[in-house]
Image (cartoon, rainbow, N blue to C red):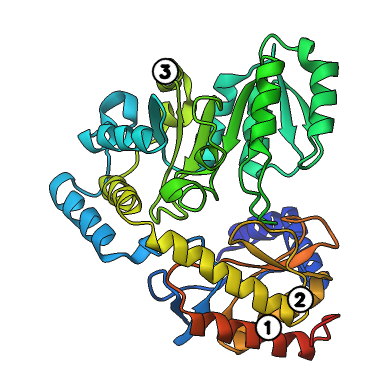
Amino acid sequence: MNLFNYAMHVKSMSKLSWVNDALRELKETGRYVPIRVLETGQGAWVKIEGRSVLNLCSNNYLGYADHPEVKKAAIEAIEEYGVGAGAVRSIAGTNILHQKLEQVVAEFKHAEASLSFQGGLLANLGTLPVLAGKEDVVFSEELNHASIIDGLRLSGAKRYVYRHLDMNDLRNQLKEHRREGKRALIVTDGVFSMDGDIAPLKEIAELGEEFEAMVYVDDAHGEGVLGDHGRGIVDHFSLNGRVDIEMGTFSKAIGSMGGFVAGGAELIELLKQRARPFLFSSALNPGDVAAVIKSIELMKKDDAPLKKLWNNAALLKKGLQEAGFNTGKSKTPITPVMIGDEKKTVEMSVSLYKKEILASPIVYPTVPQGTARIRLMPSAVHTEEDIDMAVQAFRTAGKEISVPGVV
């Protein structure tokens, strides 16, 4: 390196010195989370650093990410259509598989039409700014996912946040602020990913009807988990036709990649003209699309994996509670093990990893300070022996780091 380049390097490093300070602060406060690298596909057990560990933090609820029929469908699609879509959907990127996928999703969700995106995050970022703009008003749940928050910021709409699951607060805010916007939109997660509780969607739909506000539900963690054969939260509450827009993801229970929205045919047509991720980013790849179609086909055919998922979740919660752990207020397979202290939560995760349990810590800013937890995600491919092993490892690790109440 010559003298000039060295001087420029030093100058650049000086400008970025804050990066090391930020990393140091994360480590000192116990909020630096190590990222584990999997050396195998998703499953009940995975290999990391050459050793097998029990995987308890994957969103692969039904085991479809490594299902032989799903993999076969993806391989066959790649052989016929190639590995890439080649363009954005509005130019030359719409393949016949995309059309089939959107028909399959609409039928599965009992909706008029659907539109696929490259991810759930992009579905929110693309759809919300079309539904609401600067002349409109939005009522957003306090614990909505970051992608909803970002989508609403992009919309430019006036935003009001109502308290978590508090329908009285939502009603009061609608009474006070509904007339501030030309259009109004109520937005909520269906299943809240950090706590596992469920939005009171029936009451939200009723308020939407009363105050002439559109209702949008992000059902990322409800797809494949709630409702008949995993049709989601709208089906779970028998609200078909009463929720205006359902958003979901293909990357969790469905096991592949991508996201979607489902709703009225005219709305979907408008999104094809205005949703920026649809217009300005290449389409889902053929293999991903075919995998999603096959997963939905499997879900419709057999709900045994869904039943196994819920049975495993019940066993896990029961075992952890009997061991003295606080598993929060979850009403879904999502199982938060509440620790509170962030350093202790990271220590707990490290201790579990030494005991062949992959269970990542969830700390601030993902959750509020003082509510750090280890979030467990049981799946249909775990055995009862896997669940028993996990509970025993938690019991031992909890005693080692002195988690209050653990016996």
Residue shown at 84% from the left, 59% from the top? 369
Q: Is residue 388 above or below residue 18?
A: below
Mark 1 or 3: the one toward you = 1
Mark 2 or 1: the one toward you = 2
Among numbered discs 2 and 1, the one appearing first in the sequence: 2
Identify the disc placed on residue 273.
3
Amino acid type, residue under disc 2 in the picture: Phe
User: Can residue 250 be seen in the rendering of this structure?
Assistant: no
Quadrant of the drawing holding the C terminus = bottom right
Q: Is residue 146 above or below residue 114?
A: below
Q: Position of residue 6 (x, y in %)?
A: 63, 62
Q: Position of residue 210 (x, y in %)?
A: 70, 17
Element marked by disc 1: helix
In the rendered structure, the answer to whether residue 69 lies left or right of residue 337 reads: left
For the residues labelled 3 and 2, the Cα–Cα distance comes to 50 Å
Mark 3 or 2: the one toward you = 2
List the residue tagged with mark 1: 394
From the viewer's side, name the closer residue of 391 and 32: 391
